Amino acid sequence: MKAENFLPDDYRPAEDEPFMNERQLEYFRRKLLAWRAEILEGSRDTVESMKGGTRNIPDVADRASEETDRALELRTRDRERKLVAKIDSALRRIDEGEFGYCDVTGEPISLKRLDARPIATMSLEAQERHERREKVHRND
């Protein structure tokens, strides 16, 4: 019996069960797929609203405001496009049995961290070290 057949809707991964068992993997798979679908739906809505074309707005300030809004929307969608790639990568890691383990240390990533950020590839400690190193190098 596969996890998808018996995973209750109110299921939340718990520390007292085996790490990355079938139920936890199915939980994170569903969470990632739902997040991905939500992002893609937003992208479709953006494309549909932009297909209407730029309205001919006579007031320069209003036109500039609308163009700024469009540019902001496009930047947001670009960030979301990159996020979809990270979600796809996390789904691949689930399929390959690598999901939930830190890329740096190989240790399990905490369930709380994964629940908050299921695309995480590093444990909190490894991420903090990475960010500190990045900050030091950025200041050079």
Image (cartoon, rainbow, N blue to C red):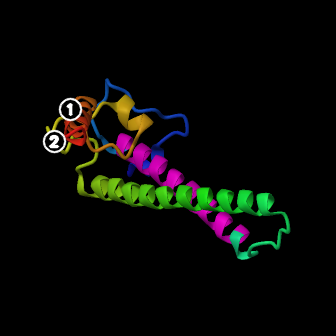
User: In terms of secondary structure, where does tag 1 sit?
Assistant: helix
Residue at 76% from the left image edge and 75% from the top image edge: 52
**Residue 58 image offset from top left, x and y in percent:** 85, 68
In the picture as drawn, the residue positioned furthest to the left comes out as 105
Task: State the residue in front, 61 or 119.
Answer: 61
Dominant secondary structure (helix, strand or loop) of the stretch shown in magenta:
helix
Kind of residue sitting beneath label 2: Val
Total label count? Answer: 2
Residue at 29% from the left image edge and 40% from the top image edge: 20
**Residue 124 image offset from top left, x and y in percent:** 28, 31
Q: Is residue 120 above or below residue 15?
A: below
Kind of residue sitting beneath label 1: Arg
Q: Which residue is mark 1?
A: 129
Side of 140 relative to 65 (left or right): left
**Residue 5 image offset from top left, x and y in percent:** 47, 50
Residue at 39% from the left image edge and 43% from the top image edge: 118
Measured in 3D between alpha carbons, the distance from the residue under mark 1 to the one under mark 2, in whole angstroms, is 10 Å
Task: State the residue in front, 110 or 14.
Answer: 110
Task: State the residue in front, 30 or 118.
Answer: 118
- Residue 89, disc: none
Side of 105 relative to 15 (left or right): left
Question: For the magenta stretch, what is the residue range?
Answer: 23-49
User: Residue 39 is drawn in which quadrant?
Assistant: bottom right
Q: Is residue 34 above or below residue 104?
A: below
Q: Is residue 28 magenta?
A: yes
Q: Are marks 1 and 2 in contact (CB under 8 Å)?
A: yes
User: Residue 100 is drawn in which quadrant?
Assistant: top left
Q: Which residue is mark 2?
A: 104
In the picture as drawn, the residue positioned furthest to the right comes out as 58
